Each structure stands twice: as structure tokens, then as C-alpha cells.
Image (cartoon, rainbow, N blue to C red):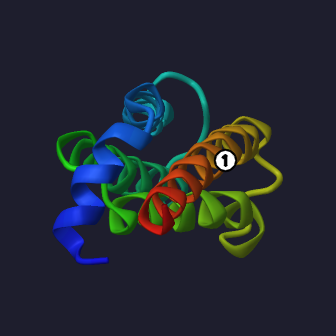
Amino acid sequence: MNSNALNKTSATTTESWIDWTNLVLGAVLIVSPWIGLGGSGSVAANAVVCGFVVACAAGVALAKPSLGAERTNAWVGVWLLAAPWVLAFSGNAGATWTSITIGLAITCFAGIQVTRLKRSARG
């Protein structure tokens, strides 16, 4: 199936509320260090960068549903799940729980969209 057919089909088989939710979750990540959800230094930088990437990918997905945007969000979500241990901030409860809960939500929502896009490409 060519990419034009995928884009036409996928526009009707993705759920825009999921991308809006990921956009909001990205925005929450961006401001999380300043609203008491954890971290300074590299922890804050990680939240801001990941939030920016998620928000941008969700914006792209809203404009034109694509596997690339959804996969980007899925991988950032997985990174957020691992980040407290990789970046050694698991002792900061606020930052850890923010990273884990938002990462889990983003990963799940992006996974739903990837599945929907793949199904629409097959059918």
C-alpha cells in the first residue's frame, strides 16, 4: 500500500483525543519541574526535552496521522519509564512518579495509535 493510501485511511482510524492527550501530557512534562512534580538540573532538562518531543510528535500526528510520530512518542514513553534509574533520580519521588506515570500513559496511547495505523494499512 502506498503512503498516500495509508494517510487517507489512517486519518479515519486514529483517535484524535489520544493525540490531544499526549500533547497535554507533553506540556505537563515541560512544566513539571516548576510545578512541584520533580527535579532540577538533568532531571528537569530530561522532562523538558521529552515533553517538547512528545508535544511536537503529537502535534504532527494531529495534523497528519503517521507511524513515525506515534513511534516517536512510544519510544519517548519507554525512555521516561527507564529514566529514573538510567539518570539516577529514582530517589526523587516526585520526579520518579511523574516520569513513570506520564511515560506509561504516553507509551500506551501511542501504542494504541500505532496498532490502529497498522490495522488500517493492512485492511
Residue at image location 65% in from the left, 40% down from the top: 105
Marks counted in the figure total: 1
- Between 105 and 99, which is closer to the camera in this rendering? 105
Q: Confirm whether residue 30 shows in the render.
A: no
For disc 1, the neighbor class at 10 Å (few under 14, some 14 to 19, many from 20) is: some
Question: What residue is shown at x 61% (from left), y 55% (from top)?
Answer: 111
Task: Return the x and y of residue 2 as percentages of the image width and height.
Answer: 23, 77
Q: Quadrant of the N terminus?
A: bottom left
Q: Is residue 103 visible?
A: yes
Helix, strand or loop for disc 1: helix
Q: 93 above or below 112?
A: above
Q: Is residue 11 left or right of residue 67?
A: left
Q: Residue furthest front?
A: 123
Residue bearing mark 1? 108
- Residue 57 image offset from top left, x and y in percent: 31, 53
- Left or right: 113, with 31 as reference point: right
Q: Residue at x 45, y 56 (%)?
A: 120
User: Foreground: 117 or 106?
Assistant: 117
Which residue occupies 40% across, 37% down?
Answer: 19
**Left or right of 52 on screen, residue 112:** right
Point out residue 41 in the picture as x, y percentages from the top left corner: 47, 56
Q: Position of residue 44 (x, y in %)?
A: 47, 50
Q: Is residue 108 left or right of residue 55?
A: right
In the figure, 80 relative to 59: above or below? below
The amino acid on which the numbered mark 1 sits, given as a three-letter code, is Cys
